[in-house]
Amino acid sequence: MPVVINQPSVWQRVSPFFRGFDGPLLLAVLLLCVLGLLTMYSVGFDHGTRFSDHARNMLIAVAVVFVVAQVPPQRLMTVAVPLYVAGVVLLLAVEFFGITKKGATRWVNVGVVIQPSEIMKMALPLMLAWWFQRREGQLRPFDFAVAGGLLLLPVGLIMKQPDLGTALLVMSAGLFVIFFAGLSWKLIVPPVLLGVVGITLLVGFSDSLCQPGVDWHVLHDYQKQRVCTLMDPTRDPLGKGFHTIQGMIAIGSGGVWGKGFMQGTQTHLEFIPERTTDFIFAAFSEEFGLLGVLGLMACFIFLVGRGLVIAMEAPTLFARLLAGAISLIFFVYAFVNMGMVSGILPVVGVPLPFISYGGTAMVTLGLGVGMLMSIAKAKRLVQT
């Protein structure tokens, strides 16, 4: 009697690779990608190949998400130290062999031109989560001091490039890991209070501090100008303040309902500088209005919230610290970008996740989402 062997279908063969993907997280990312493609088509259709390049970068990021999601958190731990060391070495290479563009030395050629500071956005939280996992159950002040040193080394190298925006993101990523690891409030409150006092004094004496010839010592001249522009963009409306003023005009002109898809006058008459990158939020606000902005913010809140839920349910300390830090990195990205375009934060060159143009940033975001997927997948495997 012949033996009948049922061959598995193609879907049965590939479905194990998709099993365990976190549906809510995937939905939030897909919604943001759709909004990013719509916005980029509008602002970039007459801007060379920006739209097609953005779609390509998004596909690469999706591939990165799929690949990294297959890697269990235990394997991610094994690449933490090598990735961190490689990132620091590349940052040192930028100091000696870096490529300078627009007055900043941030890139290095290693066969392809890369920006090492982008690597540190994920390498640093990986490294710190690995460190605290190793010290689990026996954390002492010395361990937090070591973590502080691991944080300050790459941040200092990035600030020398100079790249204040990326340094802020990298520092935030590291501080989130240290905070979630159990840093005492006694060490958190004093710097926060000092910062509040410093900002208050800066606002109070901004007229005298922002006068020409006044040296702030700790900041570069361009960084001083950004802070002074934040205090009063009309100091130089056609120069340093132009970006901020035009961004606020575009956001306000969108009203509640927006001017409509591809109907933004500030955008298409090219009043908004960097409309496909740092200031794409202004173009989005003009065309989709307050309701569109609230929808965009809801997507980001859902993404961050889902990431924090994954962190709370993670099976190990390493996974909890990493997932929590990555989730709040998305928050910092969105908050800083929207804040600088709206005129409540200095212009520091931070992209809007999944919306702004940028290949390296898009791949970095894909890496972060992939790690969250990996941690969520590990949780389901532990439960079953």
Image: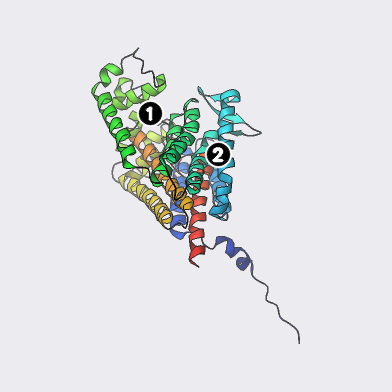
Q: Residue furthest top?
A: 213
**Where does residue 226 sit, x and y in percent of width and height?**
37, 25
Which residue is painted at 52% across and 63% down in the image?
Answer: 381
Q: Which residue is mark 2?
A: 84
Label 1's element? helix
Work out whether residue 21 can be spotted. Answer: no
SS class, disc 2? helix
Which residue corresponds to mark 1? Answer: 243
**Mark 2 neighbour density, 10 Å: few (under 14) some (14–19) many (20 or more):** many
Tell me: 62 left or right of 167.
right
Residue at the far left in the pictured view: 204
254 and 332: which is toward the camera: 332
Which residue: 55% across, 49% down?
77
Q: How many marks?
A: 2
Q: Amino acid at mark 2?
A: Tyr
Of residues 116 and 185, which is closer to you in this image? 185
* First-in-chain label (1 vs 2): 2
Residue 182 in view, yes or no: yes
- Residue mark closest to the camera, 1 vs 2: 2
Which color scheme does this rendered protein use?
rainbow
Relative placement, left or right, of 91 versus 302 is right
Instruction: Where is residue 258? Give x, y as percent.
Output: 33, 44
What residue occupies the far right of the structure in this picture?
Answer: 1
